[in-house]
Image: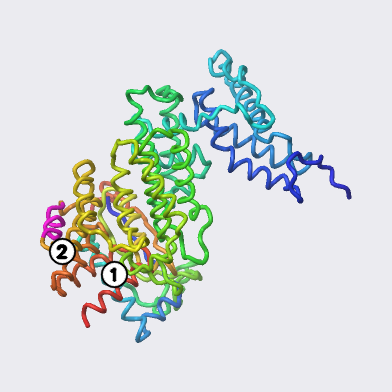
Amino acid sequence: MEYMLVYLEPAEDFAQREDPVAGPQRMAAWGAYMGAMGAAGVMRGGNALQPPHTATTVRQRDGKRLVQDGPFADTREHLGGYVIIDVPTLDDALVWASRAPCNATGATQVIPVADMTGKMPRQ
Amino acid sequence: MSDPRPPRTAGAASPPSGWQAAERAARESYGRLVALLAWRWRDLAAAEDALADAFAAALGRWPRDGVPASPEAWLMTAAKRRLLEAARHARVAQDPGVAALFELEPFAPDGAGFPDRRLALLFVCAHPALAENVRAPLMLQAVLGLDAATIAAAFLVSPAAMAQRLVRAKARIRDCGLRFDEPEAAELPARLDAVLDAIYAAYTIGSNDAALGPEAGLAEPLSGLRDEALYLGRLVAALQPDSAEAAALLALMRYCEARRPARFDDRGRFVPLAAQDPASWDRAALEEAEQLLRRAAQRRAPGVFQLEAAIQSAHCQRAFGGATPWAAIATLYATLAEHHPGIGVRIGRAVAQAEAGDVAAGLATLAALPEAAVRAHQPYWVALAHLRRMQGQPKAADDALRRAIGLTEDPRLREHLARQAAQLSR
């Protein structure tokens, strides 16, 4: 079963990425975490994302296109990255989520990937 | 405005409010009341519901009318009435459980003669008909009244899934008609082992510091899980005074408790066992553990928990002026592995072998573990890094350390391992 682990981080965590001391330490922790998922053979893919201020949001309301700088929601925690893992059960996915380095300051959300086989119209 | 409450029977200076009295009654007698109701009614879920209603009624009434002379009797009567109402409503008044409830003996005001059915309740919670992964959670809920969300966080399971697991287990108890009686003498040892295993599972899970939250602001219900497991361990040791394993399990938990204060220094940094100052261990806990282990050994019935406790006793010898007897620890682990060939036991054995001087033997013990079982098992990678370092293989040690760091949940432990990695590369 595939699960998406969504890493949510507060603004301070994004700022830390640029810190000369804390930055490399953080990267080492994330590198070890991703490496462990790779070595365990559960990782199906994923990415780190640039800070929320680099995002651009597009929507359409009343027939008008709206384009906005920044992420769509005004929340304290922002999407810092994600992975897709393949593990037998939700319990296993929670174990991997519990090891994410962002949990002490942010959070990790675990969402099962929907199986759309047979639900999409044929091309 | 004058206080409408009647004078209290027990003579404390400031009488507790209804809330406090209800909470105290909840802590002290929840398990007793659930056990007695479930034993009579043979339906754990119904007993819990009725008791929850009784507690809610108490919280509404006691602050207004005063705390009754025997809070337990009051709660029991209210819960009993609730169960009977539900039974009448469901037209099952012919149920033998209903008849049994009518005969329920009244309480003596001081609680004397109050039948303690908690051991029977523990045996039902650890019944072989129930899945192993629900036994410890069920005990924590049935005997101590912990809610599903708290238990779910401790066991790292989604709250919805844990609630469902508990509901299913209770339905199974009712539908299979599991008896709320103590097992026959012949099956007692195996059933008792299942109870002790579940208590130890709750204790080790409660000992996971990451599950407790940051040291400063512990999430309260979780910080209590260790205490709850210790409480259950004490309860079983008291109710089964002839069981060597019950005493040994309590000894094992007390050894671990004794060393807990030394696990982090005053700056919140993790301190591994070898670097801990024995003077910072809890002497009273240590002495209680030694006494319990002696009591267990006198029964001449060695078991898994007695071996585990003996290993912890050996680790604590520094407190009594000795060096850590690594060769003896390796032998104890080897014996334990014969009975209980779990991953953790074999990793412990590997480290003891290496510390006793035979690093190659330790590495061989680690190499014999199945790859699939250790792939994502953090303690294995910590041990492998340690042994590689002892062997003078800094590169291999570093690789293992990085795996360990990626598998670590507690940020303080992660930092500790990162410091080790920095020392290696120096």
Disc 2 is placed on an element classified as loop
Above or below residue B359? Residue B114 is above
Compare residues B249 and B92 and report the one nearer the observer.
B249
Task: Find the residue positioned furthest to the front.
Answer: B321
Disc 1 is placed on an element classified as strand
Q: Is the magenta region chiefly helix, strand or loop? A: helix
Q: Could you tell me which quadrant the C terminus of chain B lies in?
A: bottom left
For residue B137, side relative to residue B330 (left or right): right
Q: Find residue A115 and report its horizontal and vertical position in percent.
A: 29, 49
Compare residues B307 and B200 and report the one nearer the observer.
B307
What residue would you read off at disc 1?
A: A47
Query: Which chain contains the residue that carries disc 1?
Result: A
Query: Which chain contains the residue that carries disc 2?
Result: B
Above or below residue A17? Residue B228 is above
What residue would you read off at disc 2?
A: B357
- The residue that appears at 33% across and 30% down in the rendered structure is B189
Above or below residue B360? Residue A57 is below
Q: Find residue B270 and report its horizontal and vertical position in percent.
A: 37, 69
Q: Write the start and end of the magenta stretch as one range.
A: B361-369
What amino acid is at disc 1? Asn
Whether B374 is among the magenta residues is: no
Within 10 Å of disc 2 (Cα), the crowding (few <14, some 14-19, many 20+) is: few
